[in-house]
Image (spheres, rainbow, N blue to C red):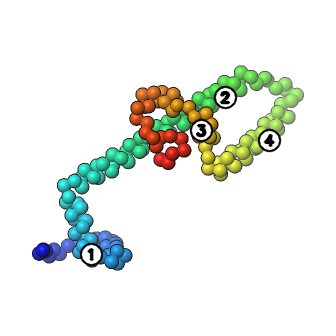
């Protein structure tokens, strides 16, 4: 097979990286450039890149759907708690205000410590609760229309 000689000018950084790759792989620089050029000129290389991009976009869409679901759960949980708290809590008499503030500060400190420990564990309380009750995910906050697009990798505990 005959080959054509070309003199190419490339950026110094690219030349350095090419030298390192050739040394690491034990290949000639010409063979690496020939393989890269063949890949670039291949008629299906554009399709392969497009497929890879589409796969990544699909994965990102699923992750955004999960984030939206978790955000909706958080919003609904907070709203329910605030409504419950405002409905049930009774006003504190003026004489007990300072004691109530001190107790509130102590409870908040305890809350932040517990939150810190929970975050260090690396698990999500929302995921723990969902895994405990294992509901059909299509019932979460308007995901019925997305239920047909949920894949097996969208199950709780499955890697993303």
Residue 60, horizontal then vertical, whole percent: 42, 44
Q: Residue at x 38, y 48 (%)?
A: 56
Asked whether disc 4 touches disc 2, contact meaning CB atoms under 8 Å apart, the reply is no
Q: Is residue 56 above or below residue 100?
A: below
Residue on which the image places disc 3: 131
Q: Residues within 10 Å of mark 3 (few under 14, many from 20)?
A: few
User: Could you tell me which secondary element the residue under label 4 belongs to?
Assistant: helix
* Cα distance in 3D space between marks 1 and 4: 67 Å
Q: Residue at x 83, y 31 (%)?
A: 97
Q: Is residue 24 above or below residue 148?
A: below
Asked whether disc 3 touches disc 2, contact meaning CB atoms under 8 Å apart, the reply is no
User: Could you tell me which secondary element the residue under label 3 belongs to?
Assistant: helix
User: Could you tell me which secondary element the residue under label 2 belongs to?
Assistant: helix
Q: Residue at x 71, y 26 (%)?
A: 85
> Which circle, 2 or 1, is nearer the viewer?
1
Front residue of this view, candidates 11 and 54: 54
Q: Is residue 60 above or below residue 11?
A: above
* Cα distance in 3D space between marks 3 and 2: 21 Å
Q: Earlier in the sequence, mark 3 or mark 2?
A: 2
Residue on which the image places disc 4: 106
Residue on which the image places disc 2: 81
Q: Residue at x 19, y 55 (%)?
A: 43
Q: Earlier in the sequence, mark 4 or mark 3?
A: 4
Using the rendered image of the protein, determine whether residue 151 is visible from the camera's viewpoint: yes
* Farthest top residue in view: 87
Numbered mark located on residue 29 in the image: 1
> Which circle, 4 or 3, is nearer the viewer?
3
Side of 35 where 134 appears, left or right: right
Residue 75, horizontal then vertical, whole percent: 58, 32
* Cα distance in 3D space between marks 4 and 3: 32 Å
* Cα distance in 3D space between marks 1 and 3: 53 Å
């Amino acid at each position: 097979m005959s080959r054509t000689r070309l003199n190419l000018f490339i950026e110094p950084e690219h030349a350095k990286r090419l030298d390192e790759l050739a040394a690491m792989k034990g290949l000639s620089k010409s063979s690496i450039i020939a393989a890269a050029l063949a890949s670039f000129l291949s008629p299906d290389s554009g399709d392969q890149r497009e497929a890879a991009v589409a796969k990544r976009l699909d994965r990102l869409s699923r992750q955004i759907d999960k984030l939206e679901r978790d955000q909706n759960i958080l919003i609904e949980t907070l709203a329910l708690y605030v409504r419950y708290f405002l409905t049930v809590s009774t006003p504190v008499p003026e004489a007990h205000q300072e004691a109530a503030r001190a107790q509130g500060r102590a409870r908040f400190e305890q809350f932040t410590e517990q939150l810190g420990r929970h975050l260090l564990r690396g698990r999500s309380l929302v995921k723990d609760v969902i895994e405990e009750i294992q509901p059909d995910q299509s019932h979460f906050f308007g995901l019925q229309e997305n239920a047909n697009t949920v894949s097996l990798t969208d199950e709780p505990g499955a890697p993303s």
